[in-house]
Amino acid sequence: MKPSHAWQQHGTVSLWRYRDNARNFPGWQLTADAEGCASLLTRLDALHTEGAGASRTLRLSAPGPAQLAVPNNRDARWVAPQRMQLILDEDSGAWQWQPHGDRQVLRLGVSALAGLRQGVLDIAAGRGDYSLGHGMDALWFWWWNAQR
């Protein structure tokens, strides 16, 4: 059995993008609680081990007021998919978001996977406010806020 097939998700992972005032934080926003970060890191490591073509879909939770308060994009409306599929691409530098029904697909290469992994480590350590990618393909990392 492949490591990705044995993996089970735990914790909370939130992904959203702003519909209003997107110039402040264009692209996607990511945060997760401690358990969600640990689970996501295990998943990213399994993708790396399996190599190109490996894929896994994550359950997502909509961000709450406490999580939205971290980037503080005022009263900007947002949209959040219910699931995110990660696909490891043969192109080492690949980084492409693709909508697919109720899920958002991120096709990424090995070098981008390393950046994503570091971003999740930073979330777990209470760091963030930076992005990978550019414009509407960016992914912003935000620390988890359990307040409110």
Image (cartoon, rainbow, N blue to C red):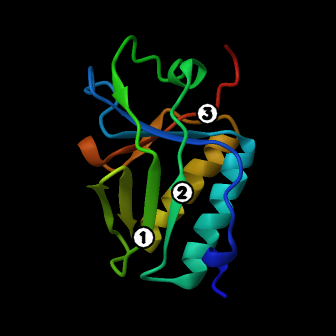
User: In the picture shown, does residue 98 fall above or below 94?
Assistant: above
User: In the picture shown, does residue 49 fall above or below 17?
Assistant: below
Residue at numbered disc 1 = 87
- Label 2 element class: strand
Horizontal and vertical percent position of residue 136: 25, 42
Looking at the image, is mark 3 or mark 1 earlier in the sequence?
1
Question: How many residues crowd around disc 1 within 10 Å: few (fewer than 14), some, or many (20 or more)?
Answer: many
Q: CA distance from mark 2 to mark 1?
A: 11 Å
Q: CA distance from mark 3 to mark 1?
A: 24 Å
Instruction: Report the side of 62 relative to 34 (left or right).
Output: left
Q: Nearer the viewer, residue 93 or 1?
A: 1
Q: Nearer the viewer, residue 30 or 12?
A: 12
Horizontal and vertical percent position of residue 117: 57, 58
- Label 1 element class: strand
Give the residue drawn at x 63%, y 44%: 122
Residue at numbered disc 3 = 143
Task: Please tell me in which quadrant of the rendered image residue 140 appears.
Answer: top left
Q: Nearer the viewer, residue 48 or 100?
A: 100
Task: Residue type at mark 3: give it.
Answer: Trp
Horizontal and vertical percent position of residue 11: 70, 46
Give the residue drawn at x 38%, y 53%: 103
Residue at numbered disc 2 = 58
Task: Residue type at mark 1: give it.
Answer: Ile
Looking at the image, is mark 2 or mark 3 earlier in the sequence?
2
